[in-house]
Amino acid sequence: MIPPRLDWLLPEPLFDPPAFSGFGLPLATLLARRGFADDEGLRRFLEAGSASLHDVSLMTDADAALARLELAIERGELIAVWGDYDADGMTAIAVWMVALRALGVPALRYVPSRLAEGYGLSQAGLEELSRRGARVVMTCDCGVSNVDEVELARGMGIDVIVTDHHVPPAVLPRAIAVVDPHRLDCAYPDEDLTGAGVAYKLAAALLGRRGVTCPDLAAFAAIGTIADMAPMTGESRAIVRLGLAELAATRRAGLRALLARACEHPAAPTGRDLGFGIAPRINAAGRIADAELAISLLLEEDVATAERLADELEAVHRQRREMTSAAVDAARALLAELEPIDGEAVDGPLALRRDEWPIGILGLVAGRLSDALGRPVAAVGLAGDELRGSVRAPDDFNVAAALGACAAHLTKRGGHAAAGGFSLLPSAWDAFSAAFGALPRPFPQGGAPVATSAGRVAVDLVLPASHLGWQLVEEIERLAPFGPGHVEPILAVTGLRVVEARRVGASGAHLLLRMHRGGEAFDAIAFGMPADRPLPEPGSALDLLGTLERDSFQGVARLRLRTLDYASREASPLAARRAAIRPAAVPIEVGAALPLTGAAG
Ligand SMILES: [Mn+2]
């Protein structure tokens, strides 16, 4: 008997959902749970596009920013666009470079070096831009905290326009305009725009005032929006939908070269392609090589050059993956030394340091370990003569507050609830790691006690295997793009019997499950299943947890359940639900009560 590996959080049964035209009972149940009440509200959500965009003038200082840009254009002043070395910051720069080029306005772009300058405006960069003749510097995806640097720029005779989406400090920089939907005095209806989303809104408004249109602005903004994990609701959803359509049709050589390498079907890119294919490649450049490689690829219009740049970026991406998995292995070895397994479950914060870890991958290492261990993790490496670290944590642990509690040992810190970064002197390491490791969970204490562990999964739908069919997968696809706030539906499926279970992949990391439902075969695949997870016996009844997907192998489309977890029928989290079945209940939420019939397709 195989128990579940994860904690399945089952939804409350819902027996009488409203009907949604074009959707069957399972998806109607899901849509009702997600707060949709009728067809009209659902249609507005599903068809989000240009009609769902708000007037950018509603954003505090947006008009001041646009007026200063128009003045610069009239006067022929040189504009510089300052971004960030991540995919959101770089695509924000791309939005502006393409928009200004469409207006015939020359502009400089600047991406700070992650290692030498770090995030945001820097004195060295401002001096360089001043030497090159910039009179106006516009920030994207950064700047709202750069009070001192904006003063420096003023001293150099540079006007700064800040556009950002990070939470501003109490005192704003004295810039010509500070455009940030998180400003307390900003009444803009949507707080969730990313740096690229803000850039898109402003650039589109500037072009609109001058009667100019230009393709690919939403395409770039969609990449940044997905890369920064914006909720797939509201305006960000509209931008992603507009951008996906633009990407599918783009003539820009750089984007086409990137799509060809990073998408399953380059002619029809999806939100998943942007999240798992495009964004990691762009980020890899800023992490371990030069951000310039990615941004020049995004903007490239010559086919041969674009192919060469895309190949270079591909190599950097591969190298980034190898470096990250080597570092994660080293971190696990370090952990085994620090905390030899004695059978006692440990869930406290963990600080791990390897001086040779590249700074650009610390966030990935901390994230991978935090996800795997269900613990707050700080990954620390050496940069010059100081240590730098990245923290990732489960949601009962506020990272920004935790770094605040360790502030006495740090020279620099920043971040938000789920992620943060910091610097410290090597001499402070012992004190810092002790202080960080001693922080309690939840942190801060007395905060909202969010129960978390490494493996809690919120189940969207409980349903019998007979519902797994083409109709269901098509209905699910109509709800895309998915992201935070609107996740890909996770199904708990009952009524399947194992035909065969075997490990596949180079190191046997994945598990292939051939299942039977009624008389039909049905495949499931579990990626990255731990080596100690028992394989189900042929013939046994198994409940599966996962997402339903369309898999094409050798040109043949098949349905497949991308499996997160499985459990023997008797040991399954669905067992109690099945036992509670009342004969009169609507069957969709009670699983095995239904006779198993072959579904369409
Ligand atoms: Mn951002």
Image (tube, rainbow, N blue to C red):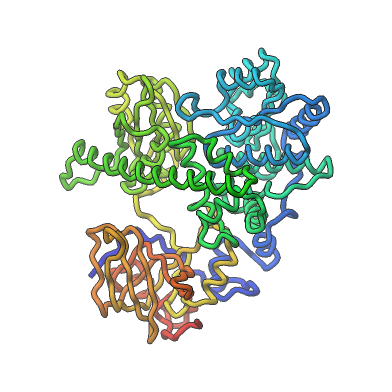
Q: Decide which of 541, 361 is in the foreground and name it.
A: 361
- Rendered residue at 58%/37% (across/down): 89
Quarter of image, res 66: top right
Q: Decide which of 80, 576 is in the foreground and name it.
A: 80
| Tally of numbered discs | 0
Image position of 120 with respect to 581: above or below: above
| x then y, percent, for residue 542 | 32, 73
Locate residue 455 relative to residue 401 in the image: left or right.
Answer: left
| x then y, percent, for residue 569 | 30, 73
Q: Decide which of 403, 161 is in the foreground and name it.
A: 161
Image position of 272 with respect to 208: above or below: below
Q: Decide which of 234, 395 is in the foreground and name it.
A: 234
Asked if one can make out residue 169 in the rendered structure from this viewpoint, the answer is yes
Image position of 204 with respect to 429: above or below: below
Asked if one can make out residue 238 in the rendered structure from this viewpoint, the answer is no
| x then y, percent, for residue 70 | 80, 31
- Rendered residue at 68%/43% (across/down): 200
Locate residue 37 relative to residue 14 in the image: left or right.
Answer: right
Quarter of image, res 560: bottom left
- Rendered residue at 78%/47% (across/down): 213
Quarter of image, res 524: bottom left
Q: Quarter of the image containing the N terminus?
A: bottom left
Determine the residue located farthest toward the left in the rendered image.
Answer: 342
